[in-house]
Each structure stands twice: as structure tokens, then as C-alpha cells.
Amino acid sequence: MIVEERKKRLRDIIQKNQFVSLQELKAATQTSLSTVRRDLADLAAEGVVRRVHGGVELIVPDRDNMTVSQRRTIYQADKQQIAKRAVAELKGGEMIFLDAGTTTGEVIAYLADKKPAVTVVTNSVHHAAKLSDLMIPVMIIGGQVKQTTDAVIGAAAVNQINHMVFQTSFIGADGLSVDFGLTTPDLEEAAIKKAVVARSQTSYVLADASKIGTASFAKAVDLAQVTLITTRLTADQRQALQQVMTVIEAEETT
């Protein structure tokens, strides 16, 4: 296993389990403890992990203040798994909305193989460019661009959405809480999500398990209004969420 592959394997294991012992990492990578320690030192220098007594733990960053490029590296394997499962809900030929965000962005690669092609409406500058590069029919909502997320926001954007109908929408979230609903740090991004869900026949929120049970500043919609696609819920998380919404857990791929 080459160095970068090994580091990716370490990163995925730590992100999945939050805390892992050195012996577990040694067994998973089939290398020596000295090699594991050296790789972990590199990951620690990158700000990904923190060495603690008996092992290593994931550093969970402040999502609200992260740039798009920083968000894209967090829980990458989970995001791809969720995205693949989300696209499986499409039959092909639909008019869909793709929300700004890194998890929703992973959907794009899987859309390229959908036949007949879907038409995508998005409020993300980044998503629109990538969709266009893949020759996927795309429309971008107009309005003000929020630089930290590449999301188009504002009254003009909401007004356009209110004149459209989507068969399916894929929405991102910073927090999902039974008590507080689907939340995001920005009031205007919350307004976009609320409008999209209202204009969609079916709405899916794509969120890794680290966002479950957390709440950000601005509520977008109640959980009952969306179906969650996620990974690796605990029994307690699953029980709580299934009382208020439909939950789809993506199966782990190898």
C-alpha cells in the first residue's frame, strides 16, 4: 500500500469511528506501529487528527466558518456513499434541484450515467460549472453569491425558485435535530432550502451522521418535510429520527 493510499485508509477509518487505537490502525493497514505513527504525525500536521492516550481521534472543525474547499475534505467517503444512494432514487429524465454544498456536490458524478438525462437546477456556481463540464443539462439560479459556500442567495433567488416545480430535490444541511429541524448557519441559505422543499414533489436531505442531533443558527424546514439519506446511524439516532421522518441508510461500499 503506497503512502497516500495508506493515509487515505487511516483517514477514512478515523472519520468512521471518531477514536481508534494504534493497534487497530496497525491491523487495518497491515503495517508496523512506527509506520502508523509516522502517517498519523503527517495527518496531525494537516489538522485532521489529534493524538490522545491510547490512540488517535478525529478533529471535528467548526463547520460554520469553513470554506467550500475545507468542507470538501471532511467525511469524503461518507459523502460519496450518500450521493450514490441518492441518485439511485432517480428514474431518469426528472427535473431536479441540487442544493449548494459538498455532500450534494458528490451527486454530480453519479448523475452523468443517468439515462435519460436529468435536468438540474442549482444555486451553486461550483455545481453549475461541473454539471456543464459533464454535459448535464443545467440551469443556475440568479442572485447574490455567498463566497464561503459558492451558494446563490437572496430574494431574487427565492423568487425564481417559487416559480418552478421540481420532481426531486437534494438538500444539504449543517444540522439535523428532532427538536430544531433542518438547520444551516445562514438565514438566506435557509430561505432557499425552505423554498425548494415547498416546490418539490420529493425532497431528500443528504447528511453524514456527524450532523445528526446538532443544530445550527437558522431553521429551514421541519424534518417531516424531507427524507434523510445518511450513513451509520446509531440505534438511538435511528429510533429518534424514524419517529418524525423517513430515513434511508446507504450501505457501505468497498
Image (cartoon, grey):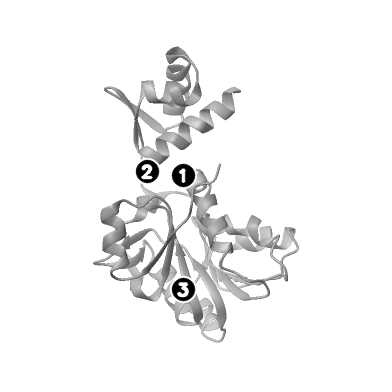
Q: Position of residue 105 (x, y in %)?
A: 57, 57
In the image, taking residue 228 as reference, residue 177 lies left or right, namely left
- Mark 3 belongs to which amino acid? Ile
Q: Which residue is mark 2?
A: 61
* Amino acid at pointer 1: Ile
Residue under numbered circle 3: 192
| Picture residue at 65% right of the left edge, 62% below the top | 111
Dividing the picture into quadrants, the one containing residue 61 is top left
Residue toward you, 137 or 244: 244
Is there a contact, CB below 8 Å, between mark 3 and mark 1?
no
Badge 2 marks a residue whose secondary structure is loop
Circle 1 residue: 74
* Viewer-side label of 3, 1: 1
Q: CA distance from mark 3 to mark 1?
A: 24 Å
Going 31% across and 58% down the picture, which residue do you hit? 238
Left or right, residue 48 beside residue 131: left
Labels 1 and 2 touching (C-beta < 8 A) = yes
Report helix, strand or loop for mark 1.
loop
Q: Residue furthest bottom?
A: 163
Q: Name the quadrant containing residue 112.
A: bottom right
* Side of 90 where 41 appears, left or right: left
The mark that comes first in sequence, 3 or 1, is 1
Residue at image position (55%, 74%) is 168
Q: Residue at x 50, y 43 (%)?
A: 73
Q: Relative to the observer, which residue lies in front, 105 or 91? A: 91
At which x and y percent is residue 144? 53, 69
